[in-house]
Image (spheres, rainbow, N blue to C red):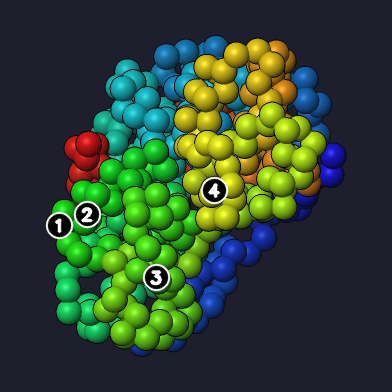
C-alpha cells in the first residue's frame, strides 16, 4: 500500500500553516491573492509529548469539563480523534447533534471550517463552537468564494432570460449558504441532492449548482437530465467559459469544483477491483466522477456507505471509493467482510488531517483555564440567511 502525503508532515504536527490562496473577481477578471489562515502557534511541549501523554492529557481535560463540552468527530477524522467524539457523523448530522445538546456550553468540532460554521448557525446563542485547528479548511469549499459566485450570478442573470435558482452543497462557506438563502435557494447534502434539485426545478427552469461539479452532474444524470443540458462554469473565464447560447440551453449550470480525495478514484481502479474479485461490490461516494459512478454497484453519502456495509452479510466483498480513515475503520469493525479502498495509493483528506490530537488537547486545556480559543462566529446577517437556506433544506422531501 502506498500513502499519498498531500499534507506536509510539518503542518500536520503543528508547524505554522502555509499561506492559502484566495480569489477576488473584479469585472470578470479573477485575481489570485495570498491569505494566511490565523492559527495561534502551539507551545512546543504539545508536540514534544508522546502519543500516550497527549491522549492522557485529553482524557484528564475531557473528564474535568464534563457535560460543559460536547466533542463532534467527522467520519474522516483519524482514530486518535474519533475515540474522544461524543458523536460521529457527516457534516450536517454533526451540526444537528450540536443543536440537540443545548446543555453543552462548548461545541468542539473536529472537522473542517465550513462544518464548524454550520454548527454555529444551528446552535443556541449561549453555545460557543470551537475548531481545534483554524487551518482545517476544505479544498472543495475553497474552490468557490463569495466574490466569484456574485460575479457568476451577475453574468448569468445578464445573459440568461429565464429564472435561475442557486443550490449550494453543504461543503461551502456560510456566506455562500447565505447567498442562496437570500435568492430563494437552498443547501443540499450528498444524500438529498436529488430532492433539492427536484425542489429547485419546481421553482425555476435553471439551477446554478456549486461548488462540486461531480455531485451535481451525477445527480442530474440520475434524474434523467441529458449531459448536453448541463454546462460547466469556470470562474476564471468570462461567462464561465461558455457561450451565451450554451447557457440559455442549459438546465443545470455546474461550478468547476471537486473533492481532491474523491476525484482520485478512476474507472481503471474499478476495473482492476473487478478483475481481482469477480464478486466484488463497488461502493462509491457521489463526489466521484461520472464514469466511476456509472461503473459502481452502489453510490451513496458517507452515512449511506456505512449503512450499506453494516447491513451486508458476512463474506461480502467491498471496494469503497471514499476517504481512507473511514474505509479502514469499516474494515476493522467488520472483519467478516473484505473491505478495502478502491484507490491503492491511500490519500487521506489532508485538511481533516490537520486536526491533530495536540490541537484537541490544546483547546480543551484552554477551556479548563477559562480561555476560549479558535471560536467560530458567523456574523449575524450571514447567519440569518444561511439559516434560511438550511431550513429550506430541512423542509425538502
- Please identify the quadrant where the N terminus is shown: top right
Label 2 packing within 10 angstroms: few (<14), some (14-19), many (20+): many
Identify residue for label 4.
293
> Is 274 placed above or below 53 here?
below
Residue depicted at x 76% and y 32%: 277
Location of the C terminus by quadrant is: top left
Marks 3 and 1, the one that precedes in the sequence: 1
Q: Of label 4 and label 3, which has the lower sequence position?
A: 3
Which disc is residue 203 wearing? 1
Is residue 382 among the parts visible in the rendering? Answer: no
How many labels were placed on the picture? 4
Identify residue for label 3.
Answer: 228
x, y percent for residue 22: 51, 69
Residue 146 is left or right of residue 37, and the answer is: left
- Label 4 or label 2, whichever comes before in sequence order: 2
Residue 357 sits in which quadrant?
Answer: top right
Q: Which residue corresponds to the image point at 24% horizontal and 66% vertical from the top-left?
A: 206
Q: Closer to the camera: disc 2 or disc 3?
A: 3
Could you say whether the residue bearing mark 1 is in a helix, strand or loop?
loop
Q: Which mark is residue 200?
A: 2
Residue 60 — which label?
A: none
In the rendered image, residue 85, in percent from the top left (x then y), is placed at 54, 22
Mark 2 to mark 1: distance in Å? 5 Å
First in residue order: circle 2 vs circle 3: 2
225 horizontally vs 206: left or right: right
Residue depicted at 29% across the width and 36% down the height: 122
The mark nearer the N terminus, 1 or 4, is: 1
Residue appearing at x 17%, y 74% in the figure: 162
Amino acid at each position: 500500500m502506498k500513502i499519498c502525503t498531500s499534507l506536509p508532515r510539518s503542518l500536520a504536527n503543528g508547524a505554522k500553516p502555509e499561506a492559502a490562496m484566495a480569489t477576488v473577481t473584479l469585472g470578470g477578471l479573477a485575481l489570485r491573492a495570498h491569505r494566511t489562515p490565523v492559527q495561534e502557534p502551539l507551545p512546543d511541549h504539545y508536540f514534544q509529548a508522546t502519543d500516550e501523554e497527549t491522549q492522557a492529557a485529553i482524557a484528564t481535560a475531557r473528564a474535568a469539563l464534563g457535560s460543559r463540552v460536547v466533542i463532534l468527530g467527522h467520519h474522516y477524522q483519524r482514530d486518535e480523534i474519533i475515540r474522544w467524539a461524543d458523536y460521529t457523523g457527516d457534516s450536517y448530522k454533526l451540526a444537528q447533534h450540536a443543536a440537540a445538546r443545548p446543555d453543552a456550553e462548548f461545541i468542539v468540532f473536529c472537522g473542517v471550517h465550513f462544518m464548524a460554521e454550520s454548527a454555529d448557525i444551528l446552535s443556541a446563542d449561549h453555545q460557543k463552537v470551537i475548531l481545534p485547528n483554524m487551518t482545517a479548511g476544505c479544498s472543495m469549499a475553497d474552490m468557490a468564494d463569495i466574490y466569484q459566485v456574485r460575479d457568476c450570478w451577475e453574468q448569468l442573470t445578464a445573459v440568461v432570460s429565464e429564472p435561475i435558482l442557486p443550490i449550494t452543497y453543504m461543503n461551502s462557506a456560510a456566506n455562500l449558504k447565505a447567498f442562496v438563502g437570500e435568492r430563494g435557494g437552498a443547501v443540499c447534502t450528498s444524500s438529498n441532492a436529488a430532492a433539492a434539485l427536484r425542489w429547485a426545478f419546481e421553482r425555476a427552469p435553471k439551477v446554478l449548482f456549486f461548488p462540486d461539479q461531480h455531485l451535481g452532474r451525477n445527480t442530474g444524470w440520475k434524474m434523467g437530465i441529458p449531459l448536453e443540458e448541463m454546462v460547466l462554469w469556470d470562474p476564471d473565464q468570462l461567462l464561465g467559459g461558455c457561450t451565451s447560447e450554451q447557457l440559455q440551453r442549459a438546465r443545470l449550470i455546474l461550478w468547476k469544483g471537486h473533492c481532491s480525495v474523491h476525484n482520485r478514484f478512476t474507472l481503471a481502479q474499478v476495473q482492476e477491483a473487478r478483475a481481482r474479485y469477480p464478486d466484488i461490490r463497488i461502493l462509491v461516494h457521489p463526489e466521484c466522477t461520472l464514469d466511476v459512478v456509472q461503473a459502481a454497484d452502489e453510490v451513496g453519502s458517507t452515512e449511506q456507505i456505512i449503512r450499506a456495509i453494516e447491513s451486508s452479510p458476512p463474506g461480502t466483498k467491498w471496494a469503497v471509493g471514499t476517504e481512507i480513515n473511514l474505509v479502514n475503520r469499516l474494515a476493522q469493525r467488520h472483519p467478516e467482510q473484505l473491505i478495502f479502498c478502491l484507490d491503492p495509493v491511500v490519500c487521506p483528506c489532508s485538511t481533516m488531517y490537520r486536526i491533530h490530537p495536540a490541537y484537541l488537547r490544546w483547546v480543551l486545556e484552554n477551556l479548563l483555564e477559562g480561555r476560549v480559543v479558535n471560536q467560530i462566529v458567523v456574523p449575524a446577517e450571514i447567519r440569518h440567511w444561511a439559516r434560511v437556506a438550511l431550513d429550506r433544506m430541512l423542509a425538502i422531501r
